Amino acid sequence: MQTQLVAFEVSLQTPPEKLRAAVAGSNLLRSDALRSHIESKLTEYGTPLRWAVTAVDKANQTAKVEAIVTTVT
Amino acid sequence: MPTGVGAAIGGYAGDALPVAKVVAQVSDRLITHPNVLNGAQLYWPMDNAYYVEGYGLDQFAAGNWQLQPVHQNSIGIVIDQAVEDDLRWRHLQAADAASATLGLDVRAYVTTDMPLGVTLKTADSGASWGTLENPGSLLRAAERLIAEAQVKAIAVIARFPDDEDSPELEAYRQGKGVDPLAGVEAVISHLVVRTFKLPCAHAPALLPLPLDPHISPRSAAEEIGYTFLPCVLAGLSRAPQFVCGEDSLTAEMICSSQVDAVIVPASAFGGSAVMSLAPMLNRRGGQVIAVGENATTMAVQAADLGIRAIAVETYLEAVGAIAAYRAGVVPSALRAGDRRMTALN
């Protein structure tokens, strides 16, 4: 097992198929829907230990995510 | 208060404990993590404060795990093979002292079968993190304690690099910057909690630093002894157990749906636990409180994620907001000026 840091960006905008997961009156994902989206994306990198959105780019409606994951070697 | 992000309050050595003591006074229950409640040799027992490791806190907030309050836990200690003899004895004596003076059930210890190989790193955001060269050795040692000594909580003592001349350590001792150890401490305890689903906390083993008469009071708790272990043992001795799955729910268990308020540094809304709890509280009319004064290296405000929060500047105001909530009083009623209803068209 190895521990590693991964960083990626996710869109804050709600895809059309997930409109019910949008903040009322906006096109942004609710934070719980965003959390699910991030956790799903994290599985591409390994098994997450901890993660956080560390910054938000309001102009481009993206969020930076940093996470520590474990991978099996 | 997230770990390892340079929180102005809570980013140093037990310096959030005064906040925890006061929040506990105005709450039925305070649920927070070891880095808030640990002050090396200093701690403060509170009957209604629950010592919940960060991975468990994330799972609790997401509704995946519940908390089972306990009267006591038997504790086992994992000691990194890389800890030198003298330093190991200092830690074992601290554990013996906790047994003799506090009556804690510190039951057994295991030395890891390999050095854990802790490395400290910093992410682009400024948050500290790090790696273990041999995480499997940590987990094997914890497993032995659980299987052979039937312990219910695990304290881990890992040998951390003595980085006496690093600018990060110098800044930390001055009450500035990011705790360079905190991020990898979280990695260590998260590994144990994720694997075994029981309380865990970590105390780094380090050689004593040369005396510096000018260190910050916020960092001073880690300058007064050979180990940071006493607070960890005290916290673990009453840390709630984790329960997974709703089938086994009992009336004493605490669920995330029972949370009425969450208090967060205003710039740190991007953590997993907050992103779970805040929308639920927004829907239920609970309180999400953003504290402006507690600056961090993060840059995620509540509004960035569509979260509605009560903006306050200080923890004094946050405590007032909770007291008002409990009294059934809207916080704005405590301010000068008139409040009027909105007429909906």
Image (cartoon, coloured by chain):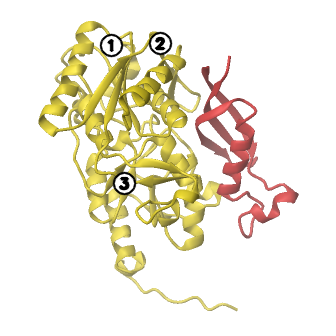
Chain colours: A red, B yellow
Q: Earlier in the sequence, mark 2 or mark 3?
A: 3
| Image location of residue A5, percent across then percent down | 62, 26
Q: Earlier in the sequence, mark 3 or mark 1?
A: 3
Q: Which residue is mark 1?
A: B164
Check chain identity for marks 1 and 2: say if they share one: yes
| Image location of residue B105, percent across then percent down | 24, 36
Q: Which residue is mark 3?
A: B69
Q: Residue placed at 36% from the left, 75% from the top?
A: B326
How packed mark 3 is, by other alpha carbons closer than 10 Å (few <14, some 14-19, many 20 or more), is some
Q: CA distance from mark 3 to mark 1?
A: 40 Å
Q: Give the structural element (helix, strand or loop) at label 3.
A: loop
Q: Which residue is mark 2?
A: B117
B12 lies above or below B227: below
Q: Amino acid at mark 1?
A: Glu
B233 lies above or below B300: above
Q: Give the structural element (helix, strand or loop) at label 1.
A: loop
* Left or right of B314 on screen, residue A37: right
Q: Earlier in the sequence, mark 1 or mark 2?
A: 2
Q: Nearer the viewer, mark 1 or mark 2?
A: 2
Q: Amino acid at mark 3?
A: Pro
